[in-house]
Image (cartoon, coloured by chain):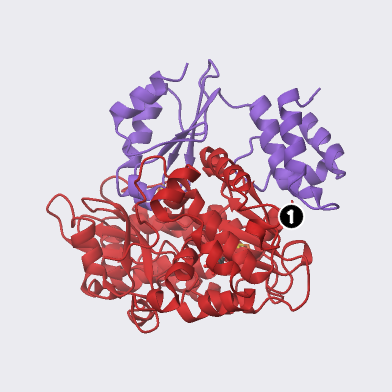
Chain colours: A purple, B red
Amino acid sequence: MFAFTEASEARIEKILAKYPEGRKISALLPLLTLAQAQEGYITPEAMVEIGKRLNVSPAYVESVCTFYTMYYTKPVGKYVVKFCINISCHLNGCDNLLEYTEKKLGIKEGETTPDKKFTLLKEECLAACCEAPVMQVNNKYHVNMTPEKVDQVLASCR
Amino acid sequence: MTQILFKNIDTPNLTSIDVYEKTLDGYQSLRKAFEKKPEEVVEMVKASGLRGRGGAGFPTGLKWSFLAKDVFPRYLACNADESEPGTCKDRDLIMKNPHLLIEGMILCSYACRIETGYIYMRGEFWEYEELMDKAIDEAYAKGYLGKNIMGSGFNLDMYTHMGAGAYICGEESALLSSLEGYRGEPRLKPPFPAVEGLYGKPTIVNNVETLCAVPFILMNGPEAYAAIGTEKSKGTKLVSVSGHVKKPGNYEVPLGTPTIDLIEKYAGGIRDGNKLKAFIPGGSSVPMLPASKADVPYDYESIMEAGSMLGSGALIVMDDTTNVVVETLRLAHFYMHESCGKCTPCREGTRWMYQILTDINNKKGKPEQVDLLNDICDNMSFKCFCPLGDAAVGPVASSIKYFREDYEELIASMKTGQPVGTI
Ligand SMILES: Cc1cc2nc3c(=O)[nH]c(=O)nc-3n(C[C@H](O)[C@H](O)[C@H](O)COP(=O)(O)O)c2cc1C
Ligand code: SF4
Ligand code: FES
């Protein structure tokens, strides 16, 4: 079963008010984002619920959801750690950092630690290229990364 | 040095409306605009010579004058999708000075008789949604947004809308598809958004930096803006200098500044005592150039003449320790990953290019594969549904044109050593 929390419901009201009458499907991405914030990933039940709210089929919700890389359709760790691997970060040694983090967490890119705490992912350019190498943890930026800073950031994840 | 976009940008708490009003005469340009007819504001922007900073460099005032006549409602969609590798200027503007963007959007909306504006931000800007929402709330509270703004009779509502990870959503028609709640796939043009855009209505799509330049034009007049830059490239540009430089950063310079000055003077030169080998002047989608062209003035026409494009203003710098093929592979991976799959030349071509480059990087390449890469480039150029396909060709074709020896070096070392770089 999936249900939006009370806090989410308050957000939904505000979100729906952004779009004109008859155009509420515009709220699809924001609602998917809310559902993911609640559950960590987008469950089939959440797709059904969102479809109901916006008057579209669950299959439609799924087709949109899978187009965008930020939605997970499988469970992920409590902290999703992403490293940009694009050109400016690569010129600044992101590969070494990623390898360092893989060793530290004992997992490969794309995997989740057995305790479900961390998922490690590669990411395309995160628009912070002048502060490369760039990492995000649960969508929060960490820039000018070094192995020491990786240690600090991961230690602050509890 | 004229600072238009980055003036006082590091003032503490500039994101708060009170500080913005005090340090930058914030929102004063609205008074100037409301004294004029909307058409007169469009004329001012035309006269300033401002061109779109999102990549295509289209004249902004001209775009505003193309809106379908007498069709309402109209929309403004600010393009804050910033996903072109190398580019990070809009993020700086948003996180440091959100009110400048709101002010620019109000001016555009007044000029174009628009009553609803959206800021489409890439999903990874998740941290800045709250910041932007707060700035918008402050602007409503001061009466700069909402009904009858400053007694002018003009109404405007403004909202943020977050994407969810897809480079193609930066392309304006894909952005509108995404904002409407569809998969972010590009649409056939024409009709252009100015005629049939968001919800089928006339829509202006402008980049963050473009809109942020408009308050200056209102406050100081179009002549003041046009006095900066070159004959055809007016004003200042934010350049994101990244890669092998000592002081990477976003620098605001008059258009026409020598590229070598951006690298040497602004970004402190190449680090570790190395030398410049190659640079990409305008983001990952434009051809790279060799060091011998680094004196090219940084403006639309000069860079075009030198064989590349100014694009989004991202100057990516590579030193002489770089094997260009290794970096090209990163970009090929990016375009393969971001191809939306709608048309065949792009979907198949990007994958094929990636595979060949991976082979070469893994030291399994064959000499004839370089020409094969060139063939694929030919088969993609101008044959794709949207400009992403051509963008994918830019780095590959130019890397072969200028740095064929880097390919040959890797291919010659076929049977020796380790892969140099794979993804
Ligand atoms: C694949 C692709 C990606 C793009 N990404 C962006 C982007 O992230 N931000 C942006 O402002 N423009 C981007 N553009 C350009 C837009 O389509 C459009 O030209 C621009 O937003 C218009 O605003 P401007 O005239 O102010 O530059 C992209 C274009 C293409 C083809
Ligand atoms: S060129 Fe690529 S991104 Fe553009 S429509 Fe075709 S497949 Fe999609
Ligand atoms: S290349 Fe890593 S943030 Fe842009």
Q: Is residue B162 visible?
A: no
Residue drawn at x 38%, y 35% as measured from the top left = A98
Amino acid on which the number 1 mark rests in the picture: Glu
Q: Say whether residue B86 is left or right of residue B145.
A: left
Q: x%, y% of residue B385?
A: 64, 70
- Per the image, the residue denoted by label 1 is B180
Q: x%, y% of residue B4?
A: 38, 63
Q: Give the quarter of the image for residue B227.
A: bottom left
Q: Say whether residue A144 is left or right of residue B271.
A: right
Q: Which chain carries label 1?
A: B
Q: x%, y% of residue B396?
A: 41, 66
Q: Say whether residue B290 is left or right of residue A75.
A: left
Image quarter hosting the N terminus of chain A = top right
* Mark 1 surroundings: few (<14), some (14-19) or many (≥20) residues within 10 A: many
Question: In the image, is residue A22 above or below residue B204?
Answer: above
Camera-side residue of B324 and B99: B99
Q: What element carries label 1?
A: loop
Q: Is residue B115 visible?
A: yes
Q: Give the quarter of the image for residue B34.
A: bottom right
Residue drawn at x 39%, y 56% as measured from the top left = B86
Question: In the image, is residue B29 above or below residue B99?
Answer: below
Residue drawn at x 45%, y 48% as measured from the top left = B20
